Amino acid sequence: MSFARNIATVATGTGISRVLGFVRDILLANLLGAGAVADAFVVAFRLPNLFRRLFTEGAFNASFVPIFAQLKSEKGEPAARAFAGQVLSGMMLAVSFATVAAEIFMEPLVFAMAPGFFKNAEEAALTVYLSRLAFPFLGFCLIAAVFSALLNSREKFGTAAFAPVILNLVLVSALVLAARYGGANAVLTAALVSGGVSLAGLAQVIWCFWGSGFSDLTLQRPRLTEPMRTMLALSVPGLVAGGITQINGFIGSLIASSAPSAVSELYYADRVYQLPLGLVSTALGLVLLPRLARMFAQGQRDLAQQVQNAAVESSLFLTLPAAVALAVSATPITAVLFQHGAFGESATRGTALALQAFALGLPAFSLAKALQPSFFALQRMRAPLLIAVIGGGLDLALSLALFPRFGAQGI
């Protein structure tokens, strides 16, 4: 019952966040449509958001939670808290250096994300400018992720689950302000919203710090202790294996940047697709990992197998009908959500085609998210890493082959 209750808590927070995300994207579509300025903003937002999701949903949870559970089981609470203090200190230091470096070298970073934009000097310059405004969001979210992971390790999911709600509330407020003060100036509107992205990250830090109850966590000088070395060794395969959906999204943006509106069509389709994916797979993954890590640390393998089986059954039971519904109703869903203001019928058609293709992969991606936590909890990263690398390579090859003929739907 506690397992089901925790999944319901995470799913509720995710669901509210996704609804607010739809409100955000409806406002964004209304203000910017699916043209050049919208494409520039999508890349500017996707750049820090990609790394946020890679590290917080993939590498960080996969490497931190099992080690924290193991230390707590074997050496007690003080050793686990000392490890957490070292991780927080190291994260703050790394975030500071990375943010400064990214602001300086933003142009090559944007080129890596969307090389097609650089065919037009104005579009490239706008994307770099918006990216500089939005990039601090990543640093704030990574610091918030430490407090979220600490809570998740103790199977307290409420604060972390509702952190994205705070993020989207700030972004919706930024869009409302942009609509009022940006007026018909799409570039000013995009700049105001990009600044709001960074403010949303700061709001997440404040929320997670306030709600974590870890205000007495002691910052320690980062040192390469054995637990820290283990966490770093697990981070790279965890980043790839846990973040393959985000990596595929990056590949899609990279290829789509050579065609007008394709980047934003993929973005809007992905936003709809992420609702069932987030409600099911994100909730399952977050709740499964600390529970399985604790069970494996305590030698309860039979009980862990039962929990894993229940997760697989729940994943398929929920995502198979959702996939059919999205594929069949892609056009009316897209039209109702986004076809307002600058977002016209052409954008609706392109987005709906992409959504239909995304829907086909929903059960498989959700099932992968239900299976991965067992590998992460056992600190066995080779198999999920290999599978993710093969999947990413296949995605790249097929996207390159299908995009010239099918556009965003091919990706």
Image (spheres, rainbow, N blue to C red):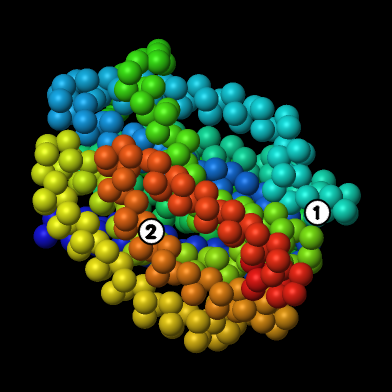
Binning the other alpha carbons within 10 Å of mark 1 as few (below 14), some (14 to 19) or many (20 upward) gives: many
Q: Nearer the viewer, residue 368 or 197?
A: 368
Residue 339, relative to residue 148: is it above or below?
A: below
Residue in view at x 88 percent, y 49 percent = 121
Picture layout, residue 56 above or below residue 263: above
Return the residue at label 2: 368
Q: Quadrant of residue 217?
A: top left
Task: Identify the secondary structure beneath mark 1.
Answer: helix
Q: Quadrant of the C terminus?
A: bottom right
Identity of the residue drawn at 79% across and 60% down:
258
What label sits on residue 75 in the rendered view?
Answer: none
Q: Which of marks 1 and 2 is nearer the N terminus?
A: 1
Across and down, in percent, residue 129 comes to 75, 43
Residue occupying image coordinates x 32% and y 55%: 371
208, above or below 182, in the image: above
* Three-letter code, disc 2: Ala
> Which amino acid is tagged 1?
Phe
Residue 285 in the figure: left or right of residue 1: right
Q: Quadrant of the N terminus?
A: bottom left
**Spatial CA span between label 1 and label 2:** 33 Å
Crowdedness of circle 2 by 10 Å Cα count: few (<14), some, many (20+)?
A: some
Question: Are discs 1 and 2 less than 8 Å apart at CB?
Answer: no
Given residues 141 and 257, the one toward you in this image is 257
Give the residue drawn at x 50%, y 86%. 329
User: Label 1, on which residue?
Assistant: 117
Q: Is residue 288 left or right of residue 23?
A: left
Residue 312 in percent (x, y) is at 27, 64
Residue 103 at x, y = what percent? 69, 33
Residue 170, visible in the rendered structure: no
